[in-house]
Image (tube, grey):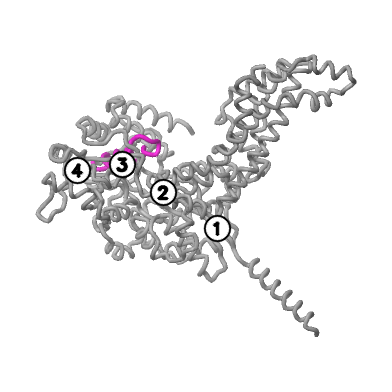
């Protein structure tokens, strides 16, 4: 055989091998938000070094694609957070389903009722995922009609991010130098008065002007409601009731705080964050996802946030409770053939194994009981771990929960910014809720 | 350190390099260019032909048809998005350039603008050409159309701008990342809660997305000014 013939054979053989290998790769599409950060993490596989939701998520996918032995390629489909569900719904209508999609557990109920999401207990068990290891809040979040419909990914909740330096200036710390959390509305107002008099700063900073800020006010309302043992749906899930004593008290509490000038007005997200880091308020009302950012800000030598701690939103009424939701992973109905389903299971198992890294870098709480001990070693995390037990959400049977969040948040923000009294805000919230739930 | 005030060093180009380092950003730009140019050219063709027809020809029901076209101006995009999406889903056309371009070709404003402009062209010019045995098509392409360049420039720029900045329809039709237009792609890069931190990145996105439009405006400024000042009013 001549050298030329031998070379041709080798090339043909190599091409056949390459084609064959490529043909055996299983691609699965992975619809998510959390942003894109190619410049910092585009090719990184170092999960332990990644920071932030985007960083951790990007490196997890990169690492999986680089190391899995099953010839699986995960293709991320990154979607903007705001219109995520609008686009997902449009994709469902166009029969362009992702193999795996992220979903808030507050939204899963609507997709189950639309017959898009099915139980995946069998898939999780086949993948080697132990459902008994789910934390109580995570398990409740993904369980509908007694069956698990998604793999929970994290618990995220509502916190008081505290500028301890300001609390110290106002004499509101204990012997150990820790801030004293109020145990009632009157105590809160007294603290806010002391801080205003001694520091000139508002007690609360919260973003309340942009459309995206409705969530802040809604989560504050929900927490105030739940700590009273309140129920927004006492007569069934098709009719909300804003006339209950607990709902009225929640609105009136926020109104009192706003009227006394103890909460910022007309501030957007960037302003709230910048203002708190600049030391311009005692407590920033935002979520667990900001803990790492606050720790990093407080560590800077020229930071206005001299000392920082995170606290679960205090119980100002009668029971410990706080708004909490989960991110989770679903496999939409009809999106996966057998091969893709098997590949999706492998990837979900990988994510399950990496749940601590997501919690570490992303700022949320893990959903596995078995990683909580490791999680507790991170700064400030011991203060918030109880959320996995006391976290609450609207019942699964309530439809259009994100719509609810928007309308409640808008009415509360209107109150904060002085545009409405609580009585009018409650009335308008009731009307809007009735309209929202009247649509089938 | 806060971000208050206009002058807040240190300055950085990292936000721009972050955008440029995104592997797909030039694909998105290309998609936007294809959609915008395609929409502009086809809208010009349809609107000029329709405008000439309404301005110069007589046919049964012309007035009714023209009113129906104008009625389209009163229909908001949101009112038709669901049936439009369903139609393209039925035809399995989502995630294609055709789906991104086609819905915007029926452009009532463009037809109205060109109709009014054609009406302003003196009939004597066409009559002179008719006397020389020129066909209607020849009159349209060789005589009348060149006189409407200012209006075409205005319509073209307006259409291009609108197409380039479009967000809602591409959001629900171009759902595969490789088919994203620049508006959708840049928005997807934002982290949760619409980039409430890292405002510099958000601002860099706005500049990056608007730069082609700015360049286009600099080249065609004269035509826009001419059209607005006098050409369109004829």
Tell me: A440 left or right of B36: left
Secondary structure at numbered mark 2:
helix
Q: Nearer the viewer, mark 4 or mark 1?
A: 1
Residue B95, placed above or below residue A41 = above
Q: Do the residues labelled 3 and 2 touch (CB within 8 Å)?
A: no
Q: Decide which of A104, B26 is in the foreground and name it.
A: B26
Q: Which chain carries label 2?
A: A
Q: Earlier in the sequence, mark 2 or mark 1?
A: 1
Q: Main secondary structure of the magenta part?
A: helix
Q: Distance between the residues labelled 2 and 1?
A: 23 Å
Tell me: B33 left or right of A175: right
Q: How far apart are marks 4 and 1 (CA)?
A: 48 Å
Q: Decide which of A299, A139 is in the foreground and name it.
A: A299
| Labels 3 and 1 positioned on one and the same chain | yes
Q: Residue A204 placed where, x, y %? A: 24, 40
Residue bearing mark 1: A75
Q: Which residue is drawn at 52% across and 65% down?
A: A65
Residue bearing mark 2: A105
Residue bearing mark 4: A318
Q: Decide which of A187, A323 is in the foreground and name it.
A: A187
Q: Earlier in the sequence, mark 3 or mark 4?
A: 3
């Amino acid at each position: 055989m001549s050298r030329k013939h031998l070379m041709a054979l080798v090339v043909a053989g190599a091409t056949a091998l390459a084609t064959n290998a490529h043909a055996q790769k299983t691609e699965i599409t992975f619809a998510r938000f959390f942003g894109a950060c190619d410049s910092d993490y585009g090719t990184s596989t170092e999960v332990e070094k990644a920071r932030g939701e985007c960083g951790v998520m990007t490196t997890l996918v990169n690492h999986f694609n680089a190391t899995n032995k099953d010839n699986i390629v995960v293709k991320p489909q990154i979607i903007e957070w705001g219109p995520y569900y609008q686009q997902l719904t449009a994709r469902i209508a166009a029969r362009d389903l992702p193999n795996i999609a992220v979903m808030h557990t507050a939204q899963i109920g609507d997709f189950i009722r639309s017959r898009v999401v099915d139980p995946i207990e069998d898939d999780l068990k086949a993948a080697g995922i132990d459902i008994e290891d789910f934390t109580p809040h995570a398990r409740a979040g993904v369980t509908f009609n007694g069956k698990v419909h998604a793999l929970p990914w994290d618990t995220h909740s509502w916190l008081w991010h505290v500028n301890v330096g300001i609390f110290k200036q106002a004499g509101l710390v204990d012997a150990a130098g820790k801030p004293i959390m109020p145990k009632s509305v009157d105590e809160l107002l007294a603290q806010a008065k002391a801080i205003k008099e001694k520091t000139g700063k508002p007690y609360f900073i919260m973003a309340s002007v942009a459309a995206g800020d409705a969530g802040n006010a809604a989560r504050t309302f929900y927490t105030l409601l739940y700590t009273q043992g309140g129920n927004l749906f006492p007569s069934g899930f098709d009719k909300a009731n804003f006339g209950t004593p607990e709902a009225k008290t929640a609105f009136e509490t926020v109104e009192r705080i706003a009227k006394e000038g103890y909460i910022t007005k007309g501030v957007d997200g960037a302003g709230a964050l910048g203002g708190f880091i600049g030391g311009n308020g005692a407590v920033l009302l935002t979520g667990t996802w900001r803990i790492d950012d606050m720790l990093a800000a407080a560590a800077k030598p020229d930071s206005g946030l001299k000392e920082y701690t995170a606290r679960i939103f205090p119980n100002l009424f009668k029971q410990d409770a706080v708004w909490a939701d989960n991110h989770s992973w679903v496999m939409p109905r009809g999106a996966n053939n057998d091969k893709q389903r098997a590949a999706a299971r492998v990837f979900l198992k990988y994510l399950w194994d990496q749940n601590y890294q997501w919690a570490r870098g992303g700022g949320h709480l893990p959903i596995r009981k078995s990683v909580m001990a490791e999680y507790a070693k991170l700064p400030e995390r011991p203060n918030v771990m109880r959320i996995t037990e006391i976290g609450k959400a609207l019942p699964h049977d309530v439809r259009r929960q994100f719509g609810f969040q928007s309308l409640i948040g808008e009415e509360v923000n209107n109150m904060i910014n002085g545009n409405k009294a609580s009585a009018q805000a409650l009335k308008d919230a009731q009307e809007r809720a009735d309209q929202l739930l009247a649509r089938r | 350190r806060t971000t208050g005030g206009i002058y807040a060093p240190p300055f950085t180009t990292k936000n721009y390099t972050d955008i440029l380092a995104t592997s797909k950003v030039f694909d998105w730009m290309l998609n936007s260019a294809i959609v915008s140019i395609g929409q502009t050219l086809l809208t010009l063709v349809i609107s000029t032909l329709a405008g000439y027809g309404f301005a110069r020809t007589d046919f049964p029901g012309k007035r009714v048809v023209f009113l129906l076209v104008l009625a389209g101006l009163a229909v908001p995009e949101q009112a038709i998005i669901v049936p439009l999406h369903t139609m393209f889903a039925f035809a399995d056309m989502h995630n294609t350039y055709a789906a991104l371009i086609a819905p915007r070709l029926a452009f009532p404003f463009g037809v109205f603008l060109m109709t009014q402009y054609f009406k302003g062209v003196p009939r004597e010019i066409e009559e002179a050409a008719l006397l020389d045995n020129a066909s209607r098509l020849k009159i349209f392409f060789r005589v009348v159309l060149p006189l409407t360049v200012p209006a075409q420039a205005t319509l073209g720029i307006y259409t291009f701008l609108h197409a380039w900045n479009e967000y809602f329809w591409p959001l629900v039709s171009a759902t595969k990342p490789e088919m994203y237009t620049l508006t959708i792609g840049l928005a997807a890069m934002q982290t949760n809660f619409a980039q409430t931190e890292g405002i510099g990145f958000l601002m860099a996105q706005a500049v990056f997305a608007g730069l082609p439009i700015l360049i286009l405006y600099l080249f065609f400024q004269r035509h826009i000014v001419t059209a607005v000042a006098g050409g369109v009013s004829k």
